[in-house]
Amino acid sequence: MAQSISDINEKIKNLTAKVLTVNELKQLVQAVGVKKATAQVDVITTGTFEPMESSGAMINLGQTDPPIKVRNCWLDGVSVYGGLGAVDLYLGASQEPEGETAMNRGGGHVIADLIAGKSINLKMIGKPNDCYPRPSFDTIITKDSINQFYLFNPRNLHQNFIVGVNSSDQTLYTYLGELKPCLGNAVYANPGAIAPLWNDPDLRLIGIGTKIFMGGGIGYVAWEGTQHFPLQKRLPNRTPVAPAATLALIGDAKQMQPQWVKGCYFRNYGASLMIGVGIPLPVIDEEVVAKASVSDAEIMTSVFDFAIARRVKPSFGAVSYAELKSGMIKIDGVKVRTAPISSIYRSLQVAETLKSWILAGEFTLTEPVAFLASDRSFVSQD
């Protein structure tokens, strides 16, 4: 029977909501079918824990005395963008320090350290003028000694992503990590059918204003993500065969927990940020359950050869996520070991944690204030 998000929120407030993780939901549908499963669930929780390179933190420092208009800034040696208001800064997760301090560290590590409550060196150079006469400032900050500190991530939660392999005779260092020569391994990023956007493939439930679990705190969907491409080719079950929809997310970093936000570094490639993100799906009708019952065997992605350093790379065909998770796929008759750069275990933990919040009445659902574009084409530079 159909129900509204308001109906579900009343159940959450009364501690009577029936909540399942997406893994539990898939098992239930296998056992009893979509119709009976729909009667046994009000909310489905999804989750992922993966590198999200297109992320960053907005930081407002509060003014010095005399005031400063920041134009160059470094946090723990990592350059921070200061071309906004006088002491508004944006720290990109993939920004790296220069020189000898650039070893295995970047903006993602600084963000994670601030979230963990650590002290960070701040160095600023200003543009002196009549309003802001101070030329420079050097101090130590923590998340408690600044005003706003929130993540604004332009592109998170790829609905699907590619598999990387390497046919050359030399090791390649990529955004998927190390690709061994002569098809020595295959690396994938997406944790598969437990991840949020597989389970709402047409973004019928997820839109601007959707409340989410973000880094152990509360976040929201702010907009479509960069490279949002909902027109990607799709299977009959509406899941895409290659990168498709993405989301821009925003959330208060002061609420976030260090176990859900980790700086990471890909050798000879650069820095990134691992973030746990979970999205609740309200069970407003049977279609929600039918879409969320999709299995790893029913979702596909493409294997690309990174030995060819071009925008369009040669493909070795498509594989299912069930094949990827088995630990071995076949490429041209050759067995190739597979591994994810996402944490499937931590992804499941995100869904479990969000479930516990909802069952305790601590997390209610929101209606999207607007839905995301469904007709966005993908533009490349030639």
Image (cartoon, helix red, strand yellow):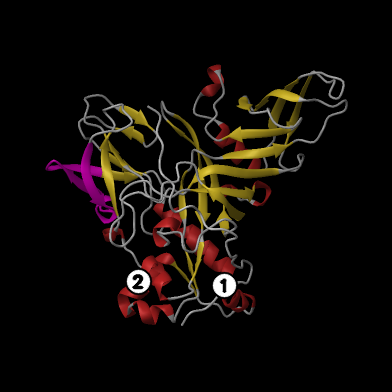
Going by the image, does 138 lie left or right of 19? right
The magenta segment is: 315-337
How many residues crowd around disc 2 within 10 Å: few (fewer than 14), some, or many (20 or more)? some
What residue appears at the point 80 percent right and 36 percent down from the top-left corner?
A: 62
Location of residue 38 in the rendering, given as x and y in whole percent from the top left corner: 42, 78
Vertical side of 313 occupied by 231: above or below: below
Identity of the residue furthest to the left in this view: 333
Q: Secondary structure at mark 1?
A: helix
What predominant SS class does the magenta segment belong to? Answer: strand
For marks 2 and 1, the one nearer the N-term is 1
Vertical side of 126 occupied by 233: above or below: below
In depth, the one of 162 and 137 nearer the eye is 162
Residue 203 visible? The answer is: yes
Vertical side of 369 occupied by 224: above or below: above
Q: How much space separates mark 2 and mark 1, taking CA atoms? A: 24 Å
Q: Secondary structure at mark 2?
A: helix
Q: Which label belongs to residue 27?
A: 2
Q: How many marks?
A: 2
What residue appears at the point 53 percent right and 30 percent down from the top-left corner?
A: 105
In depth, the one of 88 and 74 nearer the eye is 88
Going by the image, does 365 lie left or right of 293? right
Location of residue 100 in the rendering, given as x and y in whole percent from the top left corner: 54, 18
* Residue type at tag 1: Ile
What residue appears at the point 51 percent right and 54 percent down from the top-left corner?
A: 372
Give the residue number, with chain letter if any, for mark 1.
5
